[in-house]
Amino acid sequence: MASQEPVTGAQIIAEALVAQDVKYMFGIVGIPVIEVAVAAQVAGIKYVGMRNEQAACYAASAVGYLTGRPAACLVVSGPGLIHALGGMANSNMNCWPVIVLGGSSDANQETMGAFQEFPQVETCRLYSKFSARPNCLEAIPSVVEKAVRTSMYGRPGACYIDIPGDFVNKEALPNDCIIVSEGANTMDIGRTVLQNFYPRHRLDAGTFGTMGVGLGFAIAAAMVVKYEAPGKRVVCVEGDSAFGFSGMEVETICRYNLPIIIIVVNNNGIYNGFDEESWANMLEAGDPASIAPPVSLKPNARYEQVMMAFGGKGYFVHTPAELQQALNSSFSDKNVPSLINVMIDPQSDRKTQEFPWLTRSNL
């Protein structure tokens, strides 16, 4: 059975490189990329510690020339990356494939003058074919795949991947979780960012788009793993509207002591909603039955307290750090179900979709 422990960002990076047949890594380690080098070695990548980032990038690019596939160059943020730019430019001009991985300041410290903060993604666009920063842990494998592919296809050259420091040690869902997702934006976005590594490990509303299936699916999955794969976890990611369809099934979950982890992505509405102040101002203006938008729900609903009422654990979170702490606590307790109520911007929206049936509403 695969490991039940949460997977760190460093491990995701290393495993993504191995999946793309990257066999060699050259670099100079320091905060925040030490763990990436260690994870790469554990995953089977040969690591060579150099004395200067420029030489490390020259070496990695030479492997690309000799083998036809890129090696990785691992550098720290700021000056470390700047030292590697000469190697990237040389690689691009020579048409040698290479992947440069640069540590950077934490994602939540961007533009705040963090230690060694530097516009790395923008700078590397001048010296590479592709330069990007994954926006979440789940996006790392696809960004690595694109970087490796881009470095080799067409006119080969350098590609850059920016690694925020808080991504390295941040933990993701264990890679053998059964994931249940339900909701409008929640399910659609979840299909692209909640990674599955094994068959029959995802359940959602499917092509019929039935709302209310989430908790029933999660209960079924928890019963199956309880008797056929003990220790495997079930994670149910629900939109706040979707949770309302079958939310009272948390009593069933608690009654049978199924250690399901429910994550409610709460934006106070269906697609979007109001913050508390805007909601209060609207109520002062008139009867909500006459003026409240049909997509709105009560702001800051405390869904985690429903779980707590039946003996499970509940968490009300607003920040990534609070979410990470709640996830760690939930995964560490293998005997009690939990619900993490995650507040997000009520007006946040997904990107415009290519297929109009997903976004044809004029709201």
Image (cartoon, helix red, strand yellow):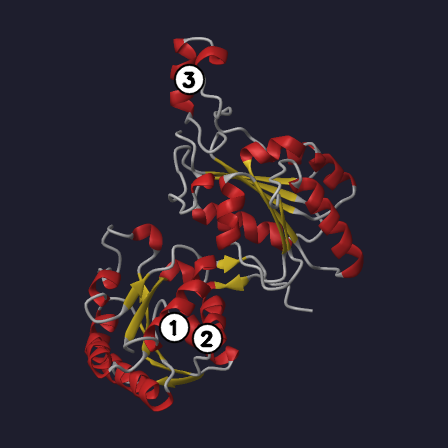
Residue where numbered disc 3 is placed? 280
Question: Does residue 110 show up?
Answer: yes
Q: Position of residue 303 (x, y in %)?
A: 58, 32
Q: Distance between the Cα atoms at labels 1 and 3?
A: 52 Å
Residue type of the residue flagged with mark 1? Arg
Instruction: Please identify the quadrant where the C terminus is shown.
Output: top left
User: Residue at left 43%, top 71%?
Assistant: 35
Residue type of the residue flagged with mark 2? Gln
Asked which quadrant contains residue 244, the reply is top right
Question: Does residue 116 show up?
Answer: no
Q: Is residue 220 left or right of residue 307?
A: right
- Label of residue 58 in the image: none
Front: mark 1 or 3? 1
As displayed, is residue 170 above or below residue 326?
Answer: below
Residue where numbered disc 2 is placed? 20
As displayed, is residue 229 above or below residue 188?
Answer: below
Residue type of the residue flagged with mark 3? Ala
Residue placed furthest toward the right: 227
Q: Looking at the image, tell me whether mark 2 or mark 1 is earlier in sequence order.
A: 2
Crowding around mark 3 (Cα neighbors within 10 Å: few <14, some 14 to 19, many 20+) is: few
Pick the residue in front: 118 or 186: 186
- Label of residue 149 in the image: 1
